[in-house]
Amino acid sequence: MDRREFLDKTARAALAAPLLAQSVRAGEAAGGARSRRIPKAVKFGMVEGDASVTEKFRLLARLGFDGVEMDSPSQLDEDTILRARDATGFTIHGVVDSVHWRRPFSDPSPEVRAEGRRALEIAIRQSARFGGTSVLVVPAVVNAEVSYDAAWERSMAEIRRVLPLAAEKKIRILFENVWNHFLLSPLEAARWVDEFESPWVGWYLDVGNVVNFGWPEQWIRILGARIGKIDVKGFSRKKRDAEGLWKGFAVKIGDGDCGWPAVRTALDEIGYDGWATAEVSGGGAKRLADVAARMDRVLGRA
């Protein structure tokens, strides 16, 4: 695909995506918005301390979490994780690709891209073995050395090579919106997912990450059924403007500018029934209990 074709497709997708979002909203309006008890989870790395995997799973269950998301590949032994899951009955709903930043699918080096692809294949297999349904993936990174269109073409080609395995294992590859200078609008994100023409790709919406440059409820309505799961955190535009970009995250879940009532309304409108996973600083039982309570409030579970 040359540059002219790339720009032409982007323009046409930008026109088509709002129509799709409108049809999703119209379908929901006909059936009425539905309130859901969204299951809540944490990233496993948020559980601090020297306890075993089994003990950590039991702690999360006692605190009211419904599941957990693991890193993959990781230093933890697969069998140890499986024994902890089986001993506690705790759900591992998916994994996070732990290599996608260091070995991006958009890298100029074919060898680096191949390493990233192999890591994603490991993550898909581990998620399936754990009983999960997804792998969270950063699709590409744009920088001074990697142009936007090159990132698009390279990463799409690499991810397409993994789709047969995702289909075989029944694991969805879910792309997260992060500050990677790529897929900067919900219209473009929708087009990205649609170009794969596969049910095994979708979107992992990070509600807090959106707030720096947009409004989460708008992303939700445009992406619609493409959203497979969501990440939960807080972000404050006021702190960002006064103290610096990364200080925007220095607020607890429910504080800041995520606009959770509007987010919940938008999730209901698209019929969302996936997982919500906290991605914030962790700690021991007291800290995690506060995270659980705050998640209940913002998700309308309290």
Image (tube, helix red, strand yellow):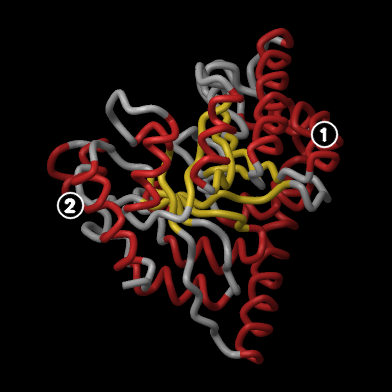
Disc marking residue 238: 2
Q: Locate the C terminus and report the quarter of the image it occupies.
A: bottom left
- In the rendered structure, the answer to whether residue 160 lies left or right of residue 104 reads right
Under mark 2, the amino acid is Lys
Q: Which quarter of the figure is the N terminus placed in?
A: top right
Q: Residue most toward the left?
A: 242
Q: Find residue 139 and name its label.
A: none
Which residue is at the front of the view, 260 or 60?
60
Residue at 36% in and 57% down: 64
Percent across and percent down for residue 17 are 68, 64
Q: In which quarter of the image is residue 145?
A: top right
Task: Identify the residue at horizontal 33%, vertical 60% (top origin).
Answer: 295
Residue 248 in picture, x, y percent from top left: 24, 44
What kind of element bears circle 2?
Answer: helix
Residue 171 pos. (x, y %): 72, 43
The CA distance from mark 2 to mark 1 is: 44 Å
Label 2 close to label 1 by CB (< 8 Å) = no
Question: Looking at the image, which residue is at 81% across and 37% down?
Answer: 163
* Numbered badge on residue 165: 1
Report the residue that reaches farthest toward the front.
87
Question: If you read the primary sequence from the N terminus, does the residue marked by circle 2 or circle 1 appear first?
Answer: 1
